[in-house]
Amino acid sequence: MTQRPHVVCHMTSSIDGRLHPSRYTQSPDGAVKDWSGAYEAIHDRLEGDAWLVGRTTMAEMAKGEAHPPASFETPARPLHRAAGSERRPLAIAPDTQGRLHFRGPDVGGDPVLVLLGDGVSDAHLAELAADGVSYLVSDGAEVDLPRALEILAAEFGVKRLLVEGGAAINGSFLAAGLVDELSVVLAPALDGGTDVEGIVAFDGGLKGRFQLSLQSAQTIEGGAVHLRYRVLSA
Ligand SMILES: NC(=O)c1ccc[n+]([C@@H]2O[C@H](COP(=O)([O-])OP(=O)(O)OC[C@H]3O[C@@H](n4cnc5c(N)ncnc54)[C@H](OP(=O)(O)O)[C@@H]3O)[C@@H](O)[C@H]2O)c1
């Protein structure tokens, strides 16, 4: 059987299931602003050897502009393993159309790997390779998440992946049956809006498919609770 990493989907949620802490009501004593400290501390304790965020979040970290090389040799497909990509943890993002640009090989010190659709140009792949960024091109227009996880395990030795996306990422991984655990920092806060998606986005495709088995519940800072669930097929 083909192996894939153990996947923990880690998130901070309001009581009404929204993932944008900057919009939350504040803790009553005003001491906790956005629960990011608790989120990051638990991220460290979860000990992933890779973490994955959506393109939007990775763009905020990458901060690059397009800078395709003036000339280049035909870049490798489907896989480019950059120098230094053996360092851990790996920082991963899907970028179907090749819109992420980097300033170097890592974000926050973690080596980057990008998952792309096969419509991405050679010039973009050459830019990533020149920046020292690893990449994996899917065999199709969309990013093939199950196959990508198999290759992360087989080619990069990733054993434990933290999926730390917004609703689209979380929904995609769950719908593909790729999430083993949920790790939720439940903030004592409300978003109150209906203009952003909840914990997952997936057009009803998750209904009735999974059960969540509580593994632990721990009160943490500012009245937040850290919940861990195992994800079981229904
Ligand atoms: N509370 C939390 O725990 C938490 C954690 C992370 C992020 N967030 C918030 O959520 C917002 C967005 O997060 P995010 O960028 O990490 O994730 P996201 O909203 O789930 O996804 C953002 C983008 O990632 C790409 N993407 C998502 N699913 C994909 C799939 N299955 N295949 C290929 N590409 C896919 C899409 O980019 P394309 O448009 O290129 O297709 C999508 O627009 C941010 O504002 C952030 O603050 C909250």
Image: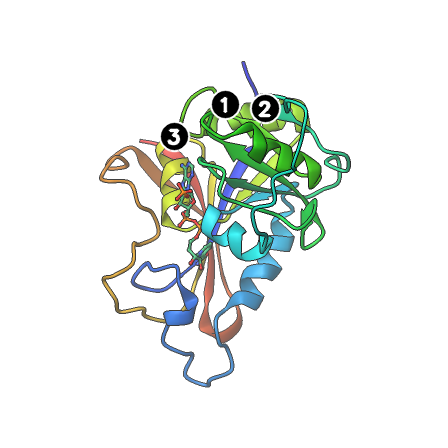
Amino acid carrying label 3: it is Ala
Judged left or right of residue 63, residue 130 is right
Q: Is residue 179 left or right of residue 192?
A: right
Q: SS of the residue at dot 2?
A: helix
Front residue of 119 and 148 = 119
Tag 2 near tag 1, CB within 8 Å: yes
Residue extending furthest toward the top? 1
**Residue identifier under label 2:** 151
Mark number displayed over residue 176: 3
Left-right relation of 137 to 141: right
Q: Measuring from the top left, give residue 210's x and y in whole percent.
A: 32, 35
Secondary element at tag 3: loop
Which quadrant holds residue 190? bottom left
Residue at mark 2: C-beta within 8 A of ligand 1: no
Spatial distance from mark 3 to mark 1, Cα to Cα?
Answer: 11 Å
Which amino acid, mark 2? Ile
Vertical order, 128 against 27 (above or below): above
Task: Tell me, for residue 54, which label it has, or none.
Answer: none
* Distance of label 3 from label 2 (alpha carbons): 16 Å
**Image: 40 above or below 28:** above
Q: Amino acid at mark 1?
A: Arg
Residue 125, x across and y down, in percent: 59, 32
The residue beneath circle 1 is: 147
